[in-house]
Image (spheres, grey):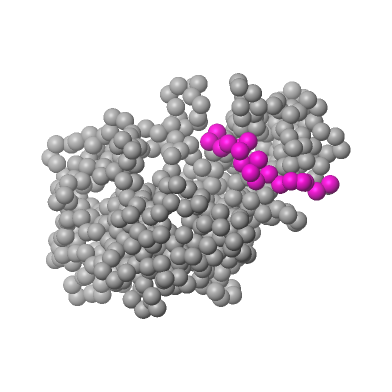
């Protein structure tokens, strides 16, 4: 029986776009090891094959000579591509037997259909203000999904408006906040002459590109004037058209909540005692989430569809440093394991990679500044050593990471700031984590001080009893950093569990004098998720709890 299209899917189903004011998108790049072994980082960025897209949807693959992140003062936006692929199988067959194939014009033609039978329905929304004050009227986005046929290859802009049923629209009728746009590329046949990118880029597949907004702020007319906090207006006068009486401007922050970002609230009025809580300046930005539903009409059969989400965020200026906690880590923490690949990843290698990523994050972090701003003081008596570290100059001594902090390694005294070393804590953190990014040194630490990693590394979502908050923390790792809910940042649960499993195995492994500790072979990490029944149960329970919080129901 002949194979037919049984379904379609988006690749990738989740992507990240970055705001930017330049008309030129950022070229593609990948992480690689530096050619210079004396490089400050463990990774560098190198150019990768990119697509240069014309106004009519035609495109040309090219290899950039170098990666440019700006055009003058304008940041180049990150504009992700999403491809459409099909599942092929015989009618009525088991989905496990279906095979993947790119959705091309030839495949569509073989089914008697064309690009016009493909449809994208695009929705976009920004819910920041609505979430902060619990008012759905302050959401803004597409009023109805924007429909784009697969044979439409021009750029389609996406604009945001307030909900039509809002009591009072924050975005006045007739006005919009631009959120970027979508362009479906024109598939092209394979060239008879094999180009350099053959086998890397498939030009025949149907794909679309999401272009984010420019990264601008919008507010009421008052936001275009200087404030007591800043002589620089919060928004450009052309963007100061939001309705001040819609409920976001002058709205006080929830006293039990957090002020983030602070420059969207009038902190001076709150700190002067004129207001019980800082009132909002009424500012919103043009970040958003795009949700794209792709539908393919099939002759004589039900239409098939697939979804993709593209999250638009501010630019990241550390492209050559990998974060220790990525979107993939967060997804792995909530997803069930997949079948094991042909070659597993040893736990030793995984832990070393994690600590290399930790070092790369630390190398960007001003520990001195964040310690002064967010270091808990005073520490509780049980968190202090009886005496300070000899010849240590980290003050105040009773603040987190001070010379009397019981978590400090007493083998390392840190000097006072100087013209040669203005940030001694940052330098020490970089040096120490650089050393521990090698598996031999890390293993030696875990063997010599068996409980050290467990004492230092904060458990997932842990907040120590007492005064600790996202704004005032101990030096538990990662120190003085906070996550999106303004609580102390931590490893994902699966990262923490794997790290502790490794540390326990190292501590328990026998060693011969003068040799490094060896870790007994561990179960492979499957797609960076361990195939451990206990982990699967815990992961499923965490996922149910997260979904319950999101939907307001109980698991």
**Residue drawn 65% across the image and 46% down it:** 374
Q: Is residue 372 magenta?
A: yes
Q: Nearer the viewer, residue 120 or 352?
A: 120
What x and y, as percent, mark residue 353?
Answer: 55, 38
**Residue drawn 71% across the image and 47% down it:** 376
**Residue drawn 83% across the image and 47% down it:** 382
Image height of 133 relative to 533, above or below: below
Q: Nearer the viewer, residue 135 or 327?
A: 135
**Residue drawn 63% across the image and 52% down it:** 470
Quarter of the figure that contains the C terminus: bottom right
Q: Nearer the viewer, residue 549 or 126?
A: 126
Q: Quadrant of residue 172?
A: bottom left
Q: Tell me, yes or no, if residue 166 can be seen here.
A: yes
Image height of 96 relative to 374, above or below: below
Q: Is residue 173 left or right of residue 309?
A: left
Q: Which residues are magenta?
A: 362-381
Q: Quadrant of residue 6?
A: bottom left
What x and y, as percent, mark residue 313?
Answer: 41, 52
Q: Tell me, yes or no, if residue 2 can be seen here.
A: no
Q: Is residue 306 magenta?
A: no
Quarter of the figure that contains the N terminus: bottom left
What x and y, as percent, mark residue 283?
Answer: 43, 59
Which residue is at the far right?
386
Image height of 217 relative to 164, above or below: above
Q: Is residue 213 left or right of residue 265?
A: left
Q: Quadrant of residue 248?
A: bottom left
What x and y, as percent, mark residue 243?
Answer: 37, 68
């Amino acid at each position: 029986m002949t194979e037919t299209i049984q379904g379609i899917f988006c690749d990738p189903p989740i992507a990240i776009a970055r705001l930017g004011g330049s008309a030129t998108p950022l070229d593609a790049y990948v992480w690689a090891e530096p050619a210079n072994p004396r490089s400050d980082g463990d990774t560098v960025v190198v150019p990768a094959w990119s697509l240069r897209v014309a106004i009519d949807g035609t495109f040309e693959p090219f290899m950039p000579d170098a990666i440019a992140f700006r055009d003058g003062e304008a940041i180049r936006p990150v504009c992700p591509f999403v491809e459409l692929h099909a599942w092929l199988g015989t009618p009525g067959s088991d989905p496990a037997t279906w095979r993947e194939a790119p959705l091309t014009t030839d495949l569509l033609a073989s089914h008697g259909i064309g690009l016009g039978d493909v449809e994208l329905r695009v929705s976009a929304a920004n819910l920041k203000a609505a979430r902060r004050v619990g008012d759905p009227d302050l959401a803004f986005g597409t009023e109805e999904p924007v429909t784009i046929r697969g044979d439409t290859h021009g750029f389609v802009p996406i604009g945001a408006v307030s909900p039509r049923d809002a009591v009072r629209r924050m975005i006045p009728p007739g006005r919009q906040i631009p959120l970027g746009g979508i362009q479906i590329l024109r598939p092209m046949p394979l060239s008879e002459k094999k180009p350099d990118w053959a086998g890397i880029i498939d030009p025949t597949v149907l794909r679309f590109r999401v272009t984010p907004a420019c990264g601008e702020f919008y507010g009421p007319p008052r936001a275009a004037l200087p404030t007591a906090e800043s002589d620089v207006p919060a928004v450009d006068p052309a963007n100061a058209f939001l309705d001040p009486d819609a409920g976001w401007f002058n709205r006080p922050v929830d006293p039990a909540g957090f002020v983030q970002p602070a420059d969207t609230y009038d902190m001076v009025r709150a700190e002067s005692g004129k207001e019980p809580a800082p009132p909002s300046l009424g500012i919103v930005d043009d970040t958003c989430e795009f949700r794209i539903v792709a539908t393919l009409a099939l002759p004589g059969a039900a239409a098939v569809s697939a979804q993709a989400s593209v999250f638009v965020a501010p630019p990241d200026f550390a492209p050559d440093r990998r974060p220790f906690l990525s979107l993939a880590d967060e997804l792995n923490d909530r997803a069930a394991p997949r079948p094991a690949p042909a070659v597993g990843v040893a736990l030793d290698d995984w832990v070393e990679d994690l600590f290399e990523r930790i070092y790369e994050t630390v190398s960007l972090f001003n520990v001195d500044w964040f310690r002064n701003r967010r270091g808990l003081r005073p520490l509780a008596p049980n968190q202090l050593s009886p005496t300070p570290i000899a010849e240590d100059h980290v003050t105040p001594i009773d603040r987190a990471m001070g010379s009397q902090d019981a978590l400090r390694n007493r083998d390392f005294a840190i000097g006072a700031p100087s013209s040669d070393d203005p940030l001694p804590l940052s330098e020490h953190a970089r040096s120490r984590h650089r050393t521990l990014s090698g598996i031999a040194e890390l293993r030696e630490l875990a063997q010599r001080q068996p409980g050290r990693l467990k004492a230092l590394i904060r458990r997932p979502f842990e907040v120590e009893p007492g005064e600790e908050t996202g704004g005032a923390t101990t030096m538990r790792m990662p120190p003085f950093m906070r996550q999106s809910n303004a609580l102390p940042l931590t490893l994902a649960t699966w990262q923490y569990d794997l790290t502790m499993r490794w540390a326990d195995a190292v501590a328990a492994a026998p060693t011969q004098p003068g040799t490094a500790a060896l870790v007994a072979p561990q179960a492979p990490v499957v797609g960076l998720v361990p195939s451990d029944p206990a982990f699967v149960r815990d992961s499923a329970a965490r996922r149910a709890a997260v979904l319950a919080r999101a939907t307001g129901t109980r698991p």
